[in-house]
Amino acid sequence: MSNITAFTVLVIIFLCARPVSAQNTHDSSNAHSYAFSLAPQFGVIHGQTEEIVYPSLTNYPNKAPGDLLSQLLWDVKPVFYYGLLLDFAQIDPMQRWGFFSALSLKNGVSGISGSMEDRDWQSKENNSLTDYSIHDNHTRELLYIDAVAGISIPSQSRVLFKAYAGVSYMRFRFSGMDGYGIYARENPKGSNIFHPIDDNPDLVDWSGQKVINYTQEWLIIAPGFSLGIYIDKHFFTELSFKISPLVLCADLDEHLTRKIQFHDYMQGGIFLEPGAGFSFAANEWLTLSLECSLRYISGTRGLIYQRPYGNGTYVKNGEAGAGLSLMDTGLLLKLRL
């Protein structure tokens, strides 16, 4: 029993002395030292993703190239997430320039996250709205995987500059359920000529039904930079920015009531991600951070492929677009290993 007690006391002394030892060797050893850090992270994502269908000039001669045939907006308002961050960096990046890298995983908590709205402009005569429906949006999956690597360059004025490149993968899976629809009357049928949507439209109650499933996947390669300031030895604040046209998107749109599947493959557009962070270092091995960023993508376009639900061969059927605007606010507790 006395041996166990003595061992326990030695372990406590070692753990308590560890940050003091690191502090005492700060100037001599940390300048060239690197370490891994592991951080559980928790936060909330708030915003919206977008699916677009563009009209064919052959079938809709009175519509301009920028006009829409269909737009679906999927709310992410809000989705809470949990995850992990693993990074490898200098223990003291202000001593000299160095290398850093990080890998982040965020997984959303499924549930109702606002509404899903579906708008169509099917008239070949004008751009008047012909179809509108709204449903509860059930977020079944929200996944972020981000990897970055770059260099950090300190200055004598407590400013730390970072330049890096990153790869981001995102996957969202939604279901539109319940709700209702308002549909302008077509006269005659199959003519793409419609009465105004407020002129005795057809009304549909979707209560108790799952109407649509939607999966959206993104792959982005983006350079970025950041400027950080060490206010003192405990407090650090940072501003960051990423921008890139290197955007790929694939989505699967399953209209359950119409028994149709659409597969879209898109690329291009613009990706922007401004961000800000504030960190408090309790000691050499424990840091608490609050981070906020806006992830915005617009102008991504590509081709649509269609088939009957669940079987058959996909055939080309028009042009699609996609986008998103998502605010991410998270809390991290970083532990140096």
Image (cartoon, rainbow, N blue to C red):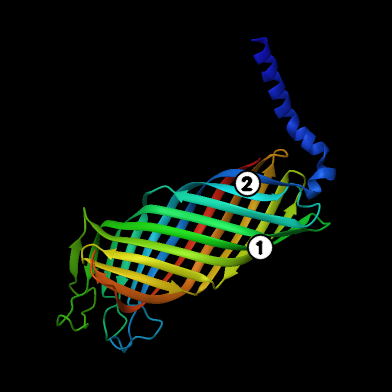
**For mark 2, does the 10 Å Cα neighbourhood hold few (<14), some (14 to 19), or many (20 or more) residues?**
some
Mark 1 vs 2: CB contact within 8 A? no
Q: Is residue 160 above or below residue 302?
A: above
Single out the residue that lies furthest toward the left.
188
Q: Residue at x 53, y 69 (%)?
A: 271
Question: Is 71 left or right of 163, judged from the image as shown?
Answer: left
**For mark 1, does the 10 Å Cα neighbourhood hold few (<14), some (14 to 19), or many (20 or more) residues?**
some
Q: Which residue is mark 1?
A: 164
Which element is circle 1 on?
Answer: strand
Q: Position of residue 132 (x, y in %)?
A: 28, 68
Q: Nearer the viewer, mark 1 or mark 2?
A: 1
Q: Residue at x 24, y 74 (%)?
A: 197
- What amino acid is labelled 1 in the image? Tyr
Q: Position of residue 264 (x, y in %)?
A: 37, 71
Give residue 289's mark.
Answer: 2
**Of the pair 2 and 217, the residue shown nearer to us:** 2
